[in-house]
Image: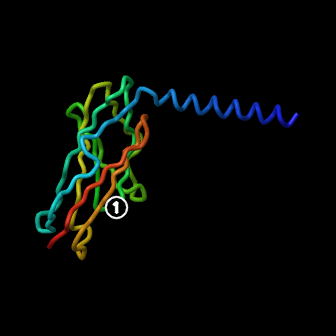
Amino acid sequence: MKKNTYTRMLVLALAIAGIFYFAKAGSSLALDATVKDMGDVSQANGIISTDFLMTNKGNKDIVINRMSTSCMCTTAQVINGGKEGPKYGMDMHGNPKGWSTVIAPGGTATLRVFYDPNMHKDLKGPVTRVVSIFTSAGTQTVKIKLNQVP
């Protein structure tokens, strides 16, 4: 009896895994870069930004429905079809809810990442920040690197 129960549980687990695998099959979000070096960033010049190009290389729509950053000094937004999405920051600081955008197969969108050097007035030197992009094709991450100067 136990062997039969274990066999059923194994079959069920494999079936669930297969559903998740095939739901993501055909979805592929490519980024033009995963790290961007922003060089020297001066507090005197204020907020700066850099763009990452995202391309749907698959044959299914990709839905982006959330983002999160690793620090309050960094925010990110998606620009898709000329339409700017809301800015996302650290989850603990209250990100927008209920937003999403779709990148069609072969389509592109821009991920714009902002860095505010004045959020850390005493910080000088190398900085690395991470942006997580949550999509129907899985989670992608990008990094910005910079050297903060006065």
> Which residue, given by chain and number where applicable, does mark 1 sit on?
71
Work out which quarter of the rendered image holds the C terminus and state it. bottom left
Residue most toward the left?
Answer: 45
x then y, percent, for residue 93:
39, 58
Residue at 31% x, 50% y is 142
130 or 28, which lies in front?
A: 28
Rate crowding at label 1 as few (under 14), some (14 to 19) or many (20 or more) other CA atoms within 10 Å: some
Q: Determine the secondary structure under disc 1.
A: loop
Indicate the amino acid at tag 1.
Cys
Asked where in the image residue 130 lies, by quadrant, the reply is bottom left
Residue at 24% x, 59% y is 145
Residue at 14% x, 67% y is 42
78 up-or-down from 60: above or below: below
Asked where in the image residue 90 lies, by quadrant, the reply is bottom left
113 up-or-down from 16: above or below: below
Residue at 71% x, 34% y is 10
> Along the horizontal axis of the image, is 53 left or right of 135?
left
Count of numbered badges drawn on the protein: 1
Work out which quarter of the rendered image holds the N terminus and state it. top right
9 or 123, which lies in front?
A: 9
Asked where in the image residue 118 lies, by quadrant, the reply is bottom left
x then y, percent, for residue 62:
37, 31
